[in-house]
Image: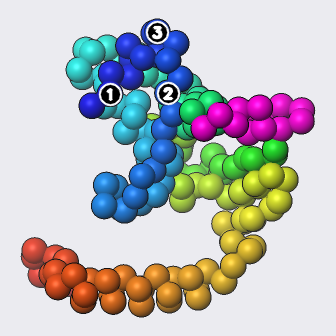
Amino acid sequence: FAKIPRMLELGVPVSLGCDGGPSNNTYDMIREMRLAALIHKPIANDPLVVSAEDVIEMATLGGAVAMGISDTVGSLEPGKHADLILVDMSDLGLTPNTNPVSNLVYAGSGHAVDTVIVNGRLLMRNRELLTMDEAEVKKKALRHSKDLIERAGVDIGPKWPVL
């Protein structure tokens, strides 16, 4: 895999993203940040390599730089799009909250995201989607996934009995 610590040392712009269900099943950027931070530590034998701050930057400004749009997105600055999330740091999984950045990366997940604003537009508040019917989206996703599984002719059921 990519030698991220060396790339960061050399000043190479590094971005982070969720590439799809076949790779991770979650599309959860916060969980991807945790993986990106942890995977290099045993290889480098250094618990400080690829810090929580590094991966947050990779997930935000790094992506904007990689796509050539860092003049409009990727950080909160005057003149840039207001793209941000508000995280409920009182979540039990984030307790004790001694370092919010570290706690978010190493203990957080998308489930703690309370509010989402994209280009100044409020898309989610109090963990409720405001721009679409979540139940309808889930219904369509289940229908499409069932159809896809049937057409592929694969058995994706559990290996063991599930109660």
Quadrant containing the N terminus is top left
- Disc 1 and disc 3: Cα gap in Å? 13 Å
Percent across and percent down for residue 18 are 45, 50
73 in the magenta segment: yes
- In front: 22, or 160? 22
Q: Amino acid at mark 3?
A: Leu
Q: Is residue 148 left or right of residue 92?
A: left
Please name the residue that numbered disc 2 is placed on: 14
Q: Would you name the residue on which mark 3 appears?
A: 10
Give the SS element for disc 3: loop
The amino acid type, in three-letter code, at marker 1 is: Ala
User: Residue drawn 10% across and 76% down?
Assistant: 160
Circles 2 and 1, Cβ within 8 Å, touching? The answer is: yes
Q: Position of residue 148 (x, y in %)?
A: 31, 83
Residue 144 lies within the magenta run: no
**Quarter of the rendering occupied by the C terminus:** bottom left
153 to the left or right of 38 = left
Dot 1 corresponds to which residue? 2
Q: CA distance from mark 2 to mark 3?
A: 11 Å
What distance separates the C-alpha of mark 2 from that of mark 1?
Answer: 10 Å
What residue range appears in magenta?
A: 67-80
| Image position of 64 with respect to 144: above or below | above
Assign a secondary structure to mark 2. loop
The image quarter in which residue 77 lies: top right
Classed neighbour count for the residue bearing mark 1: other residues with Cα under 10 Å, few (<14), some (14–19), many (≥20): few
Question: Going from the N terminus, do you reach mark 1 or mark 3 first?
Answer: 1
Most distant residue in the right direction: 78
Q: Please say whether residue 79 is visible from this viewpoint.
A: yes
Q: Position of residue 113 (x, y in %)?
A: 62, 55
